[in-house]
Image (cartoon, rainbow, N blue to C red):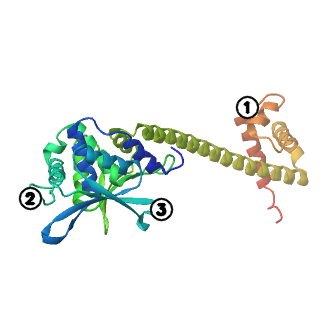
Amino acid sequence: MKGASFSEAVRDEAAATLPEQRCCRLALLSGVVRTAGSFHIHGRGHTHLEVELAAGPAARRLVELVRGLGGTCSIRTHRERRFGSGQRVDLEIGTDAETRALLRAAGVITASGSPQGQPPRRVIARRCCRAAYVRGAFLAGGSVAAPRRPVHLEVRTHDIGAAMDLARIVATDGIELRVRERERYATVYSKRLETVADLLARIGANDAVLSLAEGEVISQLRGEANRQANAETANLRRQVVAARRQLDAIARLRASGLLEALASPLQEAAELRSAHPELTLAELAEIALPAIARPTLAGRLRRVEEEAERLAPAPK
């Protein structure tokens, strides 16, 4: 999924085919219209419906959907600054009797032609139809963060009612999404990888699910590598500080003539550290003759430091 944005690639994958069953196609249409559609009133109280989408396979698929179900629609394109770059498509759904009957069947308008309040149960009663509805909603207003970025999926709707409907529909199948209302729109979203993966799988974006899973594994491996590197760096810093402190203590004892007065094991530890200032305690213990355990060597060097602390403070 390179070239286009990850969200575009996911929408393209979800738009690759249309559902086979008519009931699912009607649910898909309902999800698209309820997410990105708007009704416009003109002379004598007549209304017409427009759906705004990003240009690309999703828009072409919706045209195919409407016409395949016996409806009509016209297309015009424009550029919308709110969406950064890229072309937008306005689909004006026809007002003829066949198209209005189609919109009623999809639960978008009532028998009188006014907007339907909520998706009728007959449209979303079956699990496959609910999946198609969610797929339509994502095609109309969905976006998802690319792999290896903070997990975030959202569907932007025109109003809070459509957002609440979508959250309720996905919750029926165990997918929990949050709803947030903005000044001009509302969003249904999730920041949980498991939830995002479940939803993408429901709408047929399986390649996207695999990409997110792969990205999560890479992020975890990199995070673990960074934590390990940080831990090793911190350990090395502590070892360097300890070695400097030991060397300073040894130098002060030697300058005062007291190094030779120490017990033989302490003298041997001090000479070993002086001869190999760059080695860690574990490495020093390995080359000691006779062999010595690391904790034993650490204890002896600590006693060397304590002997040096008994001297007058080192000049600054």
- For label 3, the SS is loop
Rendered view: 76 above or below 242? below
- Mark 2 surroundings within 10 Å by alpha-carbon count, few (fewer than 14), some (14 through 19), many (20 or more): few
The quadrant in which residue 288 appears is top right
Location of residue 290 in the rendering, given as x and y in whole percent from the top left corner: 82, 28
Rendered view: 179 above or below 195? below
- C-alpha span from label 1 to label 2: 91 Å
The quadrant in which residue 92 appears is bottom left
Location of residue 195 in the rendering, given as x and y in whole percent from the top left corner: 35, 44
Residue identified by numbered label 1: 293
| Amino acid carrying mark 2 in the image | Ser
Nearer to us in this view, 20 or 312 = 20
Q: Which of marks 1 and 2 is in front?
A: 2
Nearer to us in this view, 114 or 252 = 114
| Amino acid carrying mark 3 in the image | Ser
| Amino acid carrying mark 1 in the image | Ala
The residue lying furthest to the top in this view is 290
Checking the image for residue 40, the label placed there is: none
Location of residue 22 in the rendering, given as x and y in whole percent from the top left corner: 21, 38
Residue identified by numbered label 2: 112
Of marks 1 and 2, which one's residue comes earlier in the chain? 2
Residue appearing at x 35%, y 49% in the figure: 139
**Side of 293 relative to 258 (left or right):** left
Q: Contact, CB < 8 Å: mark 3 with mark 2?
A: no
Residue identified by numbered label 3: 85
For the C terminus, the image quarter is bottom right
The residue lying furthest to the bottom in this view is 43
